[in-house]
Image: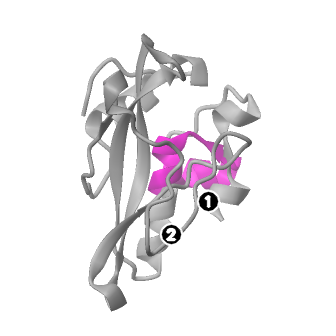
Amino acid sequence: FVRDEIFHSWDAKLELVSKTASQVLINKTGICWTKSCLLAALLRAEGIPAGISYQLLTRADDGPEEGYIIHALNTVYIKELDKWIRIDARGNKETVNAQFSLDKEVLAFPVRPELGEIDYRDNNCDLDARLIKVLKESNSILDVTTDFTM
């Protein structure tokens, strides 16, 4: 539902900044940071342990010249398998095809270490405070940026 029915703000070309999971649900749009918060909240409401993980990705497809952005995705505990898996609710498009899989990760973005990208493979209970601060201070999606690593 979150991946397929909630638009990613950049893809939809919307400047609206959904700053919380509930705003994402109301506005039907959000960026990966808040879409991951919504997915975690929905999973937890069903008794499924869920968290948030991060990747540091280049802004441009061909290299770090334009800087980096923090991408958020989700961690989910599968009790029957006694393991955490990562899933990505970013939203698919022609160049993005994230899928749910118990066998292998099929995330929105492959990390390219040769370009300085980092897959943190972390598991956080909430959105990082620095990202929350960026969202609170942003009046337009064009204001949302990061100049730090996780």
In the depicted structure, whether residue 108 falls above or below residue 131:
below
Residue 140 in sight from this viewpoint: no
Start-end of magenta stretch = 20-37
Amino acid type of the residue that numbered disc 2 sits on in the rendered structure: Leu
Determine the residue positioned at 38% across, 22% down.
146
Q: Is residue 136 magenta?
A: no
In the depicted structure, whether residue 28 falls above or below residue 62:
below
Looking at the magenta stretch, what is its main secondary structure? helix
Where disc 2 sits, the SS reads helix
Front of the two marks 1 and 2: 1
Determine the residue positioned at 45% across, 54% down.
37
Which is nearer the eye, 42 or 137? 42
Quarter holding the C terminus is: top left
Q: Are marks 1 and 2 in contact (CB under 8 Å)?
A: yes
Query: What number is the disc on residue 2?
Result: 1
In the depicted structure, whether residue 42 falls above or below residue 5:
below
Q: Position of residue 47 (x, y in %)?
A: 40, 82
- Residue 46 lies left or right of residue 25; in this view the side is left
Which residue has dot 2 on it?
A: 42
Quarter holding the N terminus is: bottom right
